[in-house]
Every structure is written in C-alpha cells, then in structure tokens.
Amino acid sequence: MSQFLLNKNGILVACVLALTLGNCTSKTPPLEYFNQMYDSYAREAQEEDYFSKNKSASRIPPYGAIPVGYKPYPYISVQTPDSLEGATKGLVSPITTPTLNDYRVGEQKYLTYCAPCHGNQGLGNGSVVGPYPRFATVPPSVVSTKIKAWTDGQLYHIITMGRGVMGSYAYQIEPEDRWKLISYVRKLQDYDTRTNK
Ligand code: HEC
C-alpha cells in the first residue's frame, strides 16, 4: 500500500480521490481548525468532567444554596393557615393599593388555578365539582364569613402550602402573583358582601 502511494499513479489516484470525495457531504462532524474560540474551558451541563467525583459536569449545589433572588418562605413548617400565629398571621401583602392591572393578573390566575374547584365567584361550585361528586372533600367557598376574616397571610399560606386534599400552587403561581390573586379574592368577597347581605 505504502509502495503504491509513493509511485506516480498512486499520487494521481490520491489527488483524484481527494478532489471528488472533498465535494461529498460528510456524515461526520467537520474538522475544526483553531477551535480554541469554540470550546471554552468551562464545562457544559451534560459534559464529562474528569475533575468531578462521578465524572459528571452537573454538580449538586452545596447544602443550603438558594437561587439568586429566591426568598425562602418562613412558615414552611406551619401545617395549616389556622395554626399561623401573631397579629398578621403570616406574611403581609406588599400590595397596599392594588392597581387595575394587579386585579387583572389576579383574576387571570384565579380563573386558571382556583376557579375549577372554588367557582368563578368563589362559591365552591367550580366546573369540576358537578362531574365529580365523589370528591372526598367538596371545595369550600372562599367568600364565606370564615375566609373573609382570614388575613392575607393565611390566604398566601394555603396557596403556597396547600391544605388537606388541596395541593400547593407554589410552583404554578409566582409569589407576587399570589398577592395579586389574593387582592382579586378580596374583590370577590366584597362583591359577595354587597350582593348577598
Ligand atoms: C383541585 C381543587 C382545588 C383547587 C384547584 C383549589 N382548591 Fe382551594 N380547596 C380545595 C379543597 C378540597 C379545600 C378543602 C381542603 C381541606 O381542608 O381538606 C380547599 C380549601 C381552600 C381554602 C380554605 C377554605 C376553608 O373554608 O377552610 C381556601 C382559602 C382555598 N382553598 C383557596 C384556594 C385558592 C386561592 C386556590 C387557587 C390558587 C385554590 N384554593 C385552588 C380544592 C381546591
């Protein structure tokens, strides 16, 4: 083989092959020359990392690490909104005077995440209640005298932590949107007070 490549014919064949095959679409990734600008030293998430114990570039964050801007919820160990203590019973809403836009966001979140069970007006007669009368616990009204007396912090707690058969909505609703949702629930309660009493 090496003999063949060294003689004249061999070189000619090699040149022809190089010219014709050079035009073919390659199935392998193209060769990269001077690739320092493409490959940085930082490891990508799914890459292999020889310096890591399990050879994975994805590291487990150190114990207690929290994402930038994340505020841990201080009442995570409190079981139910009723067991929250203090005058404010939970966090205080940062929204003192809700704007029209706050109500709009709150309404949108309420109709998406709460209304299927608690009803569009908060009466506990959402669209899933009728077809599933076997619900272990029928969703209660959120415009009852009891919930009207709840603090914003208690409402925030039930949205964040859930209670009984009602799950947590912490993953679906951002903290600031929870407060907007609560402002909207207060509007539903006002409406109920004005129309029913
Ligand atoms: C899948 C149905 C369902 C959804 C969706 C749902 N809830 Fe509930 N909710 C319930 C049930 C059932 C209870 C009673 C839970 C218990 O005590 O076991 C409840 C309880 C409550 C209570 C306490 C009522 C009381 O009288 O004690 C409030 C307030 C409340 N939900 C608000 C909300 C809000 C706000 C949302 C939207 C973020 C929401 N819920 C979404 C089913 C639901």
Image (spheres, rainbow, N blue to C red):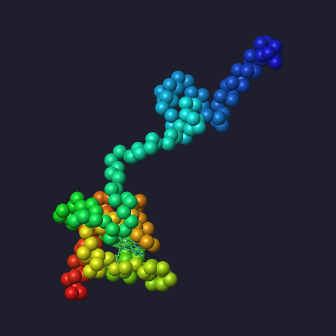
Count the numbered circles shown. 0
Figure quadrant of the N terminus: top right
* Residue 66 screen position, x and y as percent: 39, 46
Compared with 128, 61 (above or below) is: above
Compared with 65, 143 (above or below) is: below
Q: Name the residue at 22% across, 77% down.
A: 190
Name the residue nearer the viewer: 92 or 192.
92
Q: Name the residue at 33% across, 56% down.
A: 74
Point out the quarter of the image occupied by ligand 1: bottom left
Q: Name the residue at 25% across, 76% down.
A: 148
Figure quadrant of the C terminus: bottom left
- Residue at the left extreme, as displayed: 97
Name the residue nearer the viewer: 36 or 9.
36
Is 153 situated left or right of 113 in this image? left
* Residue 166 screen position, x and y as percent: 42, 71
Compared with 104, 68 (above or below) is: above
Name the residue nearer the viewer: 119 or 137.
137
* Residue 157 screen position, x and y as percent: 33, 65
In this orientation, does residue 103 appear? no
In this orientation, does residue 140 appear? yes
- Residue at the bottom extreme, as displayed: 197
Is 194 situated left or right of 179 in this image? left
* Residue 17 screen position, x and y as percent: 72, 25
Q: Name the residue at 27% across, 72% down.
A: 150
